[in-house]
Image (tube, rainbow, N blue to C red):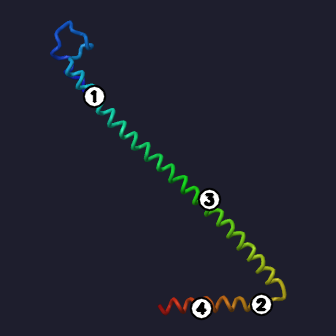
Amino acid sequence: MRRAGLGEGVPPGNYGNYGYANSGYSACEEENERLTESLRSKVTAIKSLSIEIGHEVKTQNKLLAEMDSQFDSTTGFLGKTMGKLKILSRGSQTKLLCYMMLFSLFVFFIIYWIIKLR
């Protein structure tokens, strides 16, 4: 803020505006008002931006919570499947396990062949 030269041209003994000339004081006040409005608009913009960031964070947290629950259910499903496969491999059903392995190899071979022909 500029203060140099504000009291120039005031007759001695005229201290009605605390030693400032009317034109200099009003110019300084106008500049302060302009700077205040500029600062107010910047603060408003930052406030709206921070509110939008808050909404985005809430949305992302909700998405992460949904993904976490889906991963938990998938982990449970895979755990049960692996348990059943262990039971199957311990039993005398090795012939069935062999058929399952051959079937899965056949499916992977077909998928590989289809992709390769593209």
Name the kind of residue labelled 3 in the image: Ala
For residue 72, which quarter of the picture?
Answer: bottom right
Q: Could you tell me which secondary element the residue under label 1 belongs to?
A: loop
Q: Amino acid at mark 4?
A: Phe
Q: Secondary structure at mark 3?
A: helix
- Of badges 2 and 3, nearer the viewer stands 3
Labelled disc at residue 51: none
Q: Which of marks 1 and 2 precedes in the sequence?
A: 1
> Which residue is outermost to the top?
13
Q: Nearer the viewer, residue 101 or 11?
A: 11
Question: What distance separates the C-alpha of mark 1 from that of mark 3?
Answer: 51 Å
Real-space Cα separation, disc 2 to disc 1, in angstroms: 88 Å
User: Residue under circle 2?
Assistant: 96
**Sequence-first disc among 1 and 4:** 1
Q: CA distance from mark 1 to mark 4?
A: 79 Å
Which mark is nearer the camera, 4 or 3? 3
* Nearer-N-terminus badge (1/3): 1
Where does residue 70 sit, x and y in percent of width and height? 64, 66
**Sequence-wise first label, 4 or 3:** 3
For mark 3, what is the residue? Answer: 65
Please report the residue visible at 50 percent of the width from the left and 91 percent of the height from the top. 116
Label 1 vs label 3, nearer the camera: 3
**Upstream in sequence: badge 2 or badge 3:** 3
Label number found at residue 109: 4
Residue at 20 percent of width and 17 percent of height: 21
Residue bearing the label numbered 1: 1
Q: In this orientation, which residue lies closer to the viewer: 19 or 88?
A: 19
Q: As displayed, is residue 59 above or below residue 39? A: below
Relative to residue 68, is residue 98 drawn left or right? right
Q: Position of residue 33 (x, y in %)?
A: 30, 30
Find out whether the residues at labels 2 and 1 contact each other: C-beta distance under 8 Å: no
- Residue type pointed to by label 1: Met
